Amino acid sequence: MPPVGAALWRSLRAHQVYGANTDVGKTIVSTVLCNAINQQKSSPAAFLKPVSTGPLDEADDRHIQRYAAGTLTKCLYQFDEPVSPHIAARQKQVTIPRDDDIVASVHKTLSEWAGSGINFALVETAGGVHSPGPNGNSQADLYRPLRLPIVLIADSRLGGISSSISAYESLLLRGYDVHSVLLFRDDYYQNHEYLRTYFQKKSIPLVPLPQPPARPQSNDADSLARDEEAMATYYERVARGTDVGGLLEELTAKNVQRIERLEAMSGRAHSTIWYPFTQHHGMAPKDITVIDSAYDDFFQTYTPETASQKGELRATFDGSASWWTQGLGHGNPNLALSAAYAAGRYGHVMFPGNIHEPALSLAESLLETIGNPRLQKVFYSDNGSTGMEVAIKMGLRAACDRYGWDASQEQISILGLKGSYHGDTIGVMDCSEPSTYNKKVEWYRGRGYWFDFPQVRMSQGTWKIDMPASLQEALGPDQEYSSLNGVFDLEARVASETGQRYKEYIRGTIETLVQQGMKFGSVIMEPVILGAGGMLFCDPLFQRCLADVVRAQPELFSADATPGTGAGSWSGLPIIFDEVFTGLYRLGRRSSASFLGVDADIAVNAKLLTGGLVPLCTTLASNEVFQAFSSPHKSDALLHGHSYTAHAVGCQVAVDSLRTMTQMEQGGSWNKYRQDWQPALEADRTSPEVWSVWSHGLVHELSHAPSVEGLFALGTVLSISLKDTQGGGYTSTAAQGLQQRLVAGGAHFQVHSRVLGNVLYLMASVTSTPSALREIEGVLRAALCGA
Amino acid sequence: MPPVGAALWRSLRAHQVYGANTDVGKTIVSTVLCNAINQQKSSPAAFLKPVSTGPLDEADDRHIQRYAAGTLTKCLYQFDEPVSPHIAARQKQVTIPRDDDIVASVHKTLSEWAGSGINFALVETAGGVHSPGPNGNSQADLYRPLRLPIVLIADSRLGGISSSISAYESLLLRGYDVHSVLLFRDDYYQNHEYLRTYFQKKSIPLVPLPQPPARPQSNDADSLARDEEAMATYYERVARGTDVGGLLEELTAKNVQRIERLEAMSGRAHSTIWYPFTQHHGMAPKDITVIDSAYDDFFQTYTPETASQKGELRATFDGSASWWTQGLGHGNPNLALSAAYAAGRYGHVMFPGNIHEPALSLAESLLETIGNPRLQKVFYSDNGSTGMEVAIKMGLRAACDRYGWDASQEQISILGLKGSYHGDTIGVMDCSEPSTYNKKVEWYRGRGYWFDFPQVRMSQGTWKIDMPASLQEALGPDQEYSSLNGVFDLEARVASETGQRYKEYIRGTIETLVQQGMKFGSVIMEPVILGAGGMLFCDPLFQRCLADVVRAQPELFSADATPGTGAGSWSGLPIIFDEVFTGLYRLGRRSSASFLGVDADIAVNAKLLTGGLVPLCTTLASNEVFQAFSSPHKSDALLHGHSYTAHAVGCQVAVDSLRTMTQMEQGGSWNKYRQDWQPALEADRTSPEVWSVWSHGLVHELSHAPSVEGLFALGTVLSISLKDTQGGGYTSTAAQGLQQRLVAGGAHFQVHSRVLGNVLYLMASVTSTPSALREIEGVLRAALCGA
């Protein structure tokens, strides 16, 4: 599906007319509006009925043509049966237009009108807000990408207060802005009075119109003629007696305000916002992208007005999956409803000593989803950084408790990997070696040892494991694999000579460090991919061997260490997996630890946990780690907690995200991707399954590109390392050229991406459409292979 | 208003019948259900119409009596006019029942039925879900405290798909659970087919019923008799041909499931959840409170079934304002809708380099609301702890930058107050002196100097300022004030002898510390009240003097220091105000800094920021602090950021919370409280206004109670220090007895509270009702004064 930009023009005020119900007089109100527009004589009103049902001679655009003469009308799809379009479409022997084609046609029509000097256009829906379109999807969902401002026609009949407010709420749930409400005046039910007050509080103007004449009782020529005359009189009366012109001015003003705000936002943000991870020096307003809204994988970004182009909203692929959080599409109505439900049922309720359904459901389903039998306890916090702070506190306490160390008197360190990144709070910054990210932070004091490690990449058509130059002697020569599955075949590799070398190197290093006086309290790893450190794809065998050595040789860490007791017991050191980025299907699997065949003692999840909606984090721990905080003294407890711990909105959204993702996996939603990544050699197919939404062919092809140093794809992640003559790292600028090419985009949309030094990565959601992904792949091919 | 418990009984399956619109056949469906219930012969069906409109002989309970003979029916309020109840109520010369009376009556009726062996009850609403009740409030809002499971009657007519789904969404937005959907089968429009699929995905059973006979065309006796016969035949036919009994079983099963889940939740939580700030040793499932839902200031907590009592949901006052976050009531439908709107419009969109409307609106309105001209830049993070991490990074960098210190080579410390608390991440833990909270955290290393300080409390009817024992010589004798306004009259007090003593003591202490080699990078304070440290009410003059000394004597900190340049420039040290707890009306004012008359250079807000819904934090900074990170090098930037930085849901909710609270202030919502707190002496009234939602009389009265050491109320906070023979502090148990008394509650509800050592505090929201507060005050009086 080619995505469309949202509908916005300075010259054309386009609105979508939604009815609070069917038969509330949408077309009559549209006629009134068209008449008022035509009366202004600047340009004819334009009326678009994308999908119309009912006999042709009663069709809404005919009505408009008759009673609002001069109006430009257009109907895109007409069905005869006066039923909901999804039924009508079924009953007629026609090809049903796809939803995206309908949306694209509406956008095209409005664009043409905007280009031909039309000032006002109405796009009238059929039935109520949730009446299904031809494919059975709710119109409110179907038209959402356009996010046209809404003219809501409320219901003046008995019960109409309720249906009007519910319709309004359904529109808000989808991020629409309702710009005005119109309805017929009914002095008996007085809905207009109630609703006027209701909408006034929301700064939405409400205009009551006189009741239209009753429908003709019969279809004979006389009755129809009388009806025609009565309607004509009605429209004249409305034109004289109601200030619809004033409403048009208000709508115009709102359109102008919206555009002016969009034009001003980057400047205002520039003066007010202090951006995360951003050097503001030399940053100009033009460097700030204005996001009007978002849907599925796309931002609607505003391109400002210049001498040569009009300001407009363009679809821009969210190529960082909104900083790695996005899973189920922006503006997902199910998640919005989950959030609203929890907000309505609880708000936030304080957590210590209490339990509520979303928190318990999430805890239970998360433990089940992750499937690590060691993990028994769920601790909630707000984000990956705080969740990792919790993990460190847990891990260090467990180690100090077992080994009898007094951490206030001596430094307890962690064992990790170079290039690790666990968050921005100072405690977890200390878990990474000094780097650009942390070394200028005044209170940063790295506390640990970080192993350099072999990295995996596809280069020149082959999967390679590159040993760090300084460790070639210890770890052996670089290795090559015909498929990525081979790299992950750890059960075979762990017994290999390489496995032995890795273990010996790790064991020897730890031994030396401990002899030098270091004390270690935990192992911390991001399984498989070290994200913020530069999308470093660690040889999974190395991580596996690190875990194996630590667990098999506890005596390395304390002379009187004994192996853990029982199946869930930690041995050597508690192993902490930071799956904040890599977990919950980011790499195609529920848990990235499963790639390593290692069950962590402590594991942290966030980002995708809530499907990309609100912050929430869980730190899962083994029962033994939990017990290290148990004592008769409150002061021995894990004295950590945030006010919004386990907030109901986040937990509910997470429950529903997790369920959706698991159902997608079980329902085979990703089978095509899996097939694409199935190894050519039968022998390779025995290893655990590895796949990506990015095509296998693309990775092979780009690996031969002259500027590409290496790349990989795994799950929803594509990472391309570009050759960099300046030495790489976070401050490199090598990838910025490619980033610029992506901004220019493909045939249908722009691509927003993030770079980490000489690495450009793209990240999709688990619901990304293959067509969008293939279009992006085309841009990459053109940029890198010149094809 | 006396709050009610939510409606739940094991023996009685009570459901609320909502219609997707008016005239969808609610009463006919209710009759069908009642017939099916009566057929089971275990107990008669019970039918409650709380509010009925329309001619008496057509009233719904009459219909039920006629066609579902044996059904117990009751109507609480009857209005003749067949219009929405809010209009009917206006037209009839009756006293309109208050909403809370209606809800209480419904609860009472159902309770009686439950007590008299009734198994099934239906509570039928009038019109659609949002049709207004007698006072004009939507029924979905009005009945929300009961949170009865819903039987939704969908609309089978043209347009009915839309109105049914919208009605469903409106119910979800208020946290209702829809347990089943019924509607008439219409083979032309086939709404039941579409909706069956729709609701199946949500695991909600849908039962289509045959179309009822058409309404009689006229009112003559013959027609009515024919109609009566046709209806009777219809009900017989439905009883034979539709498996309503199966639906009843499903409803019964859901009721059982709900209760069993509520019974099991504390046990399951006990085995799965690792609670924040909780010693699990000795904790049993019974110590965990199960929260079914919440509304306004009340949790609906589940009291488990025991031999002597039935399990039930009880209203429990949320006396910690949900860990200090709650501002606008639980389940606030406006905030739920704000959250849903942002979720539908954006989901979360990644923030660096981008801007979206909620983030910009919030930044701009926050700077305006706080009203501190120094603060120009807004940095977003997730919670108070991360926001304070950001603040420290900012403050330390600004100081090191100006004074040319290399923080990697020497320790830069902060200046603060004893008992401060700024969050649980390790970096901000280091900003507090060693205490129970932090000293057992392995990586904690306090980095600062913390002043002891004079505290304010009401004791024996007088406001006292107690000097710490060890500082009496330096600071002078304890002081007394006739009103709290006097304590806050800083413009007078700063020039007093006490002011001079404070300054001299502060200056001398800093001088000594710096001579001893300490370097300071920032001042950090919680203005007025140090929250987690034990609700310590610091003499505001002391905080003012600390700020004044630091700013007036920059040479204390660096030999070559010069005063700041220009109005917004910091001098001496950047001053950081942690207003996470104290800000945004918690103490009755937008900013607690305004009590001190000090404009901070950096200020942090969270908790109330989002009205008590989702985590969000802002760190506001001066332009000069911002500039300290400006350089041509990216690595000099503030490299801090969370994935969900400035998430749209949080920002939008915050925009709306802030607006609501500001409007309440400007609209005089708290004027009665202000009047209550107006000082008796005219002379005292000149000082800045001080008030609380807790009554002035209560504070005076309790100050004489034998077990009370001292207390205070400010804004929404009431804090009572109890005499403690064991020495006080976080591990004290002195307040637990009072806490138990509060759990037992008053006449209408229980009270949930938190204690901090020997301090019991209660915190209201800004929308708490005086009647609820006065009831709690009665419990406190009874407990402490024996009255």
Image (cartoon, coloured by chain):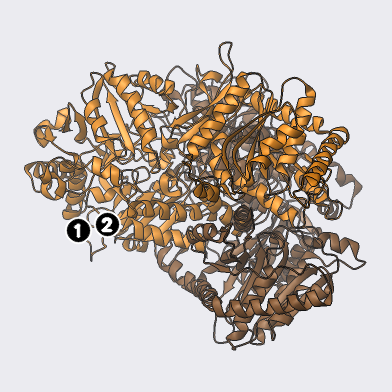
Chain colours: A orange, B brown
Q: Residue A605 vs residue A479: left or right?
A: right
From the image, tell me which residue sits under label 1.
Answer: A560
Crowd around label 1: few <14 · some 14–19 · many ≥20 (10 Å): few
Q: Residue at x 65, y 79 (%)?
A: B233
B83 is higher (above) or lower (below) than A44: below
B489 is higher (above) or lower (below) than B177: above
Q: How many circles with numbers are drawn on the protein?
A: 2
Q: Residue B174 vs residue A781: left or right?
A: right
User: At which x and y percent is residue A559?
Assistant: 18, 55
In three-dimensional space, the C-alpha distance between marks 1 and 2, rounded to whole angstroms, equals 8 Å
In this rendering, does residue B31 appear at all? yes
Q: Give the quadrant of residue B495.
A: top right
Pointer 1 chain: A
Secondary structure at badge 1 equals loop
Secondary structure at badge 2 equals helix
Q: Residue at x 71, y 40 (%)?
A: A27
User: At which x and y percent is residue A506?
Assistant: 16, 43
- Can you tell which mark lies on residue A403? 2
Say which amino acid is labelled 1.
Asp
Say if mark 1 contacts mark 2, CB within 8 Å.
yes
